Image (cartoon, rainbow, N blue to C red):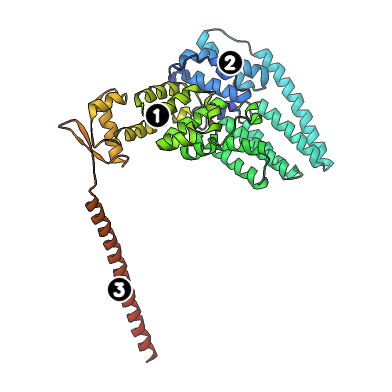
Amino acid sequence: MSSISSVMYAATGQHFGTSLARSASIPEPSLLEFNLRSYLSEYTGYAKIRRAIYVGERCPTLSIESYSIAFEELEEKTYDTTTYKHIAKLLEQLTGERRDTDEWERRVSKQVKEQDTEIRGKLERAKKQVSKKDTLQAQWELVRLQQQRGLMDESVRALQDGRTSCGGMAEQAELHMEAARVSQVMGRWLQVATYIQRTESVLPDPDETVRAELAVLRAQSDFGDGKWSAAVTGLRVLSIDTASVFARKTVTPRDIALYGTLAGLAALDRDQVKQQLLDNVQFGQFLDRMPECQALLQSYYDSKYDDALNQLTRILSFCHLDPVIGPHASALKQRIRDNIVVLYIQPFVSVRMASMATALCFGSTAQLEDTLVRMIDSGLIHARIDGTTGFLIKHTVNARDAALSRVETMHRAFAQQAELMTARIQYLEEESVRKRGARA
């Protein structure tokens, strides 16, 4: 069987048993008033455990505290003996103090065995009586038990097995929704998208609560897959009043603010950032929960790029500890910085690179030059670097040259069409001659 310890980080390539020596080392977040326990208290269950372990694997200065929080959550709310013992071992390596897990493991194993026997007995009796209602109820009990044990793959399979016992589309939809939630906690974004589609296929007109949860799941899935434009499109229409979505404590309003802000800066132009995020009343309610995001968006729109970049660095120092954003933090930083470079040079014909490097917080002119070369090669900017003068000089297109280029393009297209037409006429003539010869 596959426990959460073996699949928790499948999406990022990190596994639960990764040694401390091989974990990426990330400093503590530089956001003001960051408190790890307070941050993690906004989540519950395996969403909280997964985040605590993710922090512990990546931030040595917070590892003892984060693993301790995961250990407490596992002990109080799960039957996951595999993960529990693994965390106890990690804490022993870090602190030198051995934790006695034997008594808890014996007690929990006994409870699991009793519950498993009882549930499987219910399932067998319900199937013999051909009672779909009782079978489905017992199947749900089995799913919950497997989730408590950390057997997420098995719980998803049990959810799929339950479809044959459903009495209607709404029950099937709830099974698919639960599979999407499990996949969300595990960070398996392709599976989340798949189960969302299955939910919508059997429940084309869901009520407002289900529609809101599907929107959150889809937006988080798009963000986890690096689909910035799709993510921000879904996030900007969410409402903070949908309490039932956030009551599950797998995603928080602060998460929505972070996802929307970072995806928006990566995918939208300056005016769209203003219209879709800053001036968006609904999204503004999420920004109220994360004022740093509000400040970042405002600095970006106001062309205060040095301030925006400094705020982005502080926010990403926190996001590196987020299992959804963390894998994309470097790519997001590069994408957003590239957008800022494009905006910075937009009003100018030429820019002194030394001044530009200072204004955009590059460590040196050489670092800026490397960035500009990459952006020129990829077509993000149309300019050339004058190494003699140290200027970036934009390519300006003369109106007459542009018109001539369009005429030349049209001429080439016309010539190609004429050539094809000539070949077609020649073929028809030859075919006509061949047919006349055949008749003769």
Q: Quadrant of the C terminus?
A: bottom left
- x 25%, y 52%: residue: 402
Q: Nearer the viewer, residue 256 or 177?
A: 256
First in sequence: mark 2 vs mark 1 = 2
Percent position of residue 6, x then y: 56, 28
Kind of residue indicated by mark 1: Tyr
- x 49%, y 22%: residue: 291
Tag 3 residue = 422
Secondary structure, mark 2, is helix
Tag 2 residue = 69
Q: Residue furthest right?
A: 129
First in sequence: mark 1 vs mark 3 = 1
Tag 1 residue = 300
- Whether label 2 touches label 1, CB < 8 Å: no
Q: Alpha carbon of mark 1 to alpha carbon of mark 3: how far? A: 57 Å
Q: Alpha carbon of mark 2 to alpha carbon of mark 1: how far? A: 36 Å
Q: Alpha carbon of mark 2 to alpha carbon of mark 3: how far? A: 78 Å
Q: Is residue 352 above or below residue 36?
A: below
Q: How many marks?
A: 3
Q: Residues within 10 Å of mark 3 (few under 14, many from 20)?
A: few
Residue 92 visible in the picture: yes
Q: Quadrant of the N terminus?
A: top right
Kind of residue indicated by mark 3: Thr
Percent position of residue 3, x then y: 61, 28
